[in-house]
Image (cartoon, coloured by chain):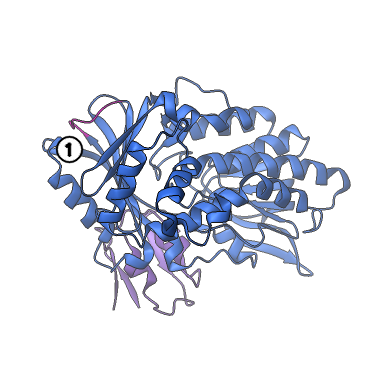
Chain colours: A blue, B purple
Amino acid sequence: MRTITCDAVIVGAGPAGSMAAKFCAQGGMDVILLEKKAEIGAPLRCAEGVSKSWLDEVGIKPEASWVRADMKGAIIKSTKGTSYQLDESKAGNEVGYVLERHLFDKALARDAANAGAKIMMRTACTGIIREGGKIVGIKAKSMGEEIEIRAKVVVAADGYESQVARWAGIDTNLKLSDIDSCIQYRMCNIDVAPDYCEFVIGSAAPGGYIWVFPKGEKIANVGIGVAGQLCTGKADAKMYLDKWIAEDPRFKNGQILEIMGGFVSTCPGLDSAVDDNIVLVGDAARIIDPITGGGICHACRTGMYAGKVLSECNKTGDFSKKALQPYEKLWRDRMEDKLFRNWMAKEKLATLDDETIDELIKLIKTSDIKNVTVYNLLKAIKEKFPQVVEGFEDLI
Amino acid sequence: MISVDVDKCLHCGGCVGSCPQNAIYLNDFVLEFNKDCNGCGRCVKLCPVGALSKE
C-alpha cells in the first residue's frame, strides 16, 4: 500500500479545512488537504448568506468572483405576516453578502495551495491509523486506490458529517433537538427584492426558519430548516417549504433550478474540540451559530486558529491534547459565550407560538434599536418580555 | 433495517452526521449502512425529503 508522509493531514477542503491548510503551510508545515468529492465547493449545501464583519478578522479580501450579491438589509417576518425591515444603516456589518460558494471555497483552497499546501482531490478518509494507541495518520481512498497518509496531526474538517472525529473517539453526536433538517431550492422567476435577505419565523418553519437569500434579479436561495424534535419522518422540511411557497404569490411563476438538502447542528459547542494528535474545525466541531445556522465565519476562524496553533506545535513536535489547548482557548474566548446564548435563544424560540412571535416582531419594529444584532434584539426583548429570555438573561 | 429510496435521496449527508451510531456512510450517491445500525430511525425522522424508511 502506498504511504504518504506529511506534518498535517486535513480532511475536507471546505472553508475550515482550506483555512487550516493555509495557516499550517504559512507556518512552515508540510500539509496535505483532502477532498472527497470531484469538485471543491460543490454540490452546494449552503444558503450562502454571510455577514461582512468577520472577513477582515480572518484575512479574506472580498473578490468579485465569489460575491454574488451585496445586501442592503434584511426582512424578518412572522408566520402571521408582521414584517420588520432592517436597513444597512441599522444593521451595519451584520448585513452582508450572498456568496457563490463553489467559487468561494475554491478561492480559499487556492490560497492554501499558494501558501504551499498540497491538495488531493477525490480522496476520501476511510479511517484513523493508530499505533500504540496514538493517532499517526489516516487511511484513505484516492481515485480508487487505498492509501495511508502518515501525519503528526489530523485536522477533521469533514463538515456536518463529522465522521473523522467519531472514528478518532471524540463524541460529536448531537441531541435530536440540536439538529435542523434543511432543504433549499434555487428558484428563478420570482418577485423578491434582489438586495434584502428574508427570514420567516414561526409555525411556517417549526423550530427553525425559512430564508430567501437573493442571488440576483428574480432569483434566490429559498430554503427551510426544521428543528429535529419536530420532524415526523414525513419529508417535513420539504412539506413545510412547499406549503409556504405555494401560499406566497411572489413565487407563483417560480421555477426550481436546483434542489439541495443539508443539516446544521444547533448545539452550544463540544466539551473538547481537540484530542491527542487531532483537531476539529468548523461544522465538524459543531461550531455553528445555533440561531442563524451560520457556519462559514466560524469555520474560517477555527481553521485559522488551528493552523496557527499547529504551526507553533510543529516547532516542538508536541501535538498532544495539552499542547493543543491554545486552540481551545482561542475559539472559546472568541465564540463560546455567543454560541451558548444563541443556543438558549433557539431553545426558547422553538417553544413560542405564532402570536408571541408576532408580538416580538411588533416590539422590535417599535423599539429604537440603533444597531441591530442578535444581541441587541434579545436586549429589547428582555425589557418587554423577560419570560422569553428566562434562564439566560445574565448573558444579555 | 433502513431502506433508501434512491430516486428521492439528495445525497446531502444529513443522516450521516445525525446518526448516533455513526453507522451511515455517503459514498458519492450511495448511502451505506453498516452493522452498527440499530434501526433507531432517527435518520428516517429527519430526512428532509422522506427518502428513508424502516423496513
In this picture, residue A295 sits left or right of residue A274: left
CA neighbours of label 1 inside 10 A, class few (<14), some (14 to 19), many (20+):
some
Most extreme residue toward the right is A316
Q: Secondary structure at mark 1?
A: strand
Determine whether, in the image, residue A136 is placed left or right of residue A174: right
Name the quadrant of the N terminus of chain A: bottom right
Q: For the point 54% across and 49% down, which residue is it?
A: A396
Query: With respect to residue A189, does A11 lie above or below?
Result: below
Q: Residue at x 32, y 66 (%)?
A: A230
Q: Return the residue at label 1.
A: A255
- The x and y percentages for residue B55 are 28, 79
Q: Examine the rendering and report whether any part of residue A307 can be seen.
A: yes
Membership of A23 in magenta stretch = no
Closest to the observer: A97 or A387? A387
Q: Identify the residue at horizontal 38%, vertical 53% (top origin).
A: B12
Q: In the image, is residue A190 part of the stretch drawn in magenta?
A: yes
In the rendered image, the residue lying farthest to the top is A64
The residues colored magenta run A188-194
Q: Indicate the position of residue A234 as horizontal and vertical percent values.
A: 24, 66
Q: From the viewer's side, name the closer residue of A293 and A312.
A: A293
Residue A60: x and y, percent?
58, 27
Q: Residue at x 46, y 62 (%)?
A: A178
Residue type marked 1? Gln
Q: Is residue A265 visible?
A: no
